[in-house]
Amino acid sequence: MKEKIRIMLVEDSNEYRHVIQFAFRDEPGFELAGVFGTAEQALRSLKRQAARVTPDVVLLDLNLPGISGFEALPELIKLAPETKVLILTQSETEADVLGTIKMGASGYLLKSSSIQEIRSGIRTVAAGGASMDSRMALYLLKTFRKDPVLADNDSILSEREMEILQLISQGLARKEIADELDISHKTVANHIAHIFEKLNVPNSPAAINKAHEKGLLGGDDRRG
């Protein structure tokens, strides 16, 4: 990972913007690359990034004036495909959770999260993982199990890959998965790469969504 993670914040609340700015002002390993009160301002900034470095992670609120964060998400991904989008919002609406993950967000945190949790979430998504509020992760897992469909034979995952996918869907980071299964971080990374390849997806949230569509999360394969 880079020495510093470049962060763009899109948040309309002055008070909450100040909280995030203060929390990351002198924090080693992070750099606030842009702070915007509307999605329109953030999108214009990304369009002007041709000669500059784009952010590694965008912290995106959903309830924004003008273009909502939900509406801005696909445009952000289109303008900066290598940038990870981490939703940071008050919304616990089920449709927002499912919709943003399906559109390509790399994580979903609530504003009630601690600064430590937000920092950890940023590090996780910047490293290619998925960061989820525990309540939202549990909701996703339950939702994915409600409506299973038949899986394509050519996409069925191995037993170990299914274990790892289950843990990803519960919001665990790669290191936590390695500790949980008592395997190396490199082995976890290799299994995740195979999962992405078999499901033809770019990241963990997309893998969870695809697995739901294929019915791969229809049962609880996690070992005690």
Image: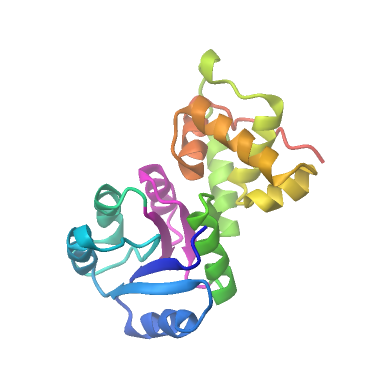
Q: Quadrant of residue 200?
A: top left
Residue 97 against residue 160 in the figure, above or below: below
198 vs 36, left or right, is right
- Measuring from the top left, give residue 35's x and y in whole percent: 31, 75
Residue 124 against residue 66 in the figure, above or below: above
> Residue at position x 62%, y 48% from top?
170
Q: Residue furthest top?
A: 153
> Residue at position x 52%, y 15% from top?
154
> Residue at position x 43%, y 59% from top?
86
Q: Nearer the viewer, residue 43 or 68?
A: 43
- Measuring from the top left, give residue 175's x and y in whole percent: 68, 52
- Measuring from the top left, give residue 74's x and y in whole percent: 28, 49
Q: Quadrant of residue 54?
A: bottom left
The region drawn magenta spans 83-112
Residue 21 covered by magenta stretch? no
Does the image show residue 152? yes
Q: Nearer the viewer, residue 100 or 118?
A: 118
> Residue at position x 42%, y 73% from top?
31
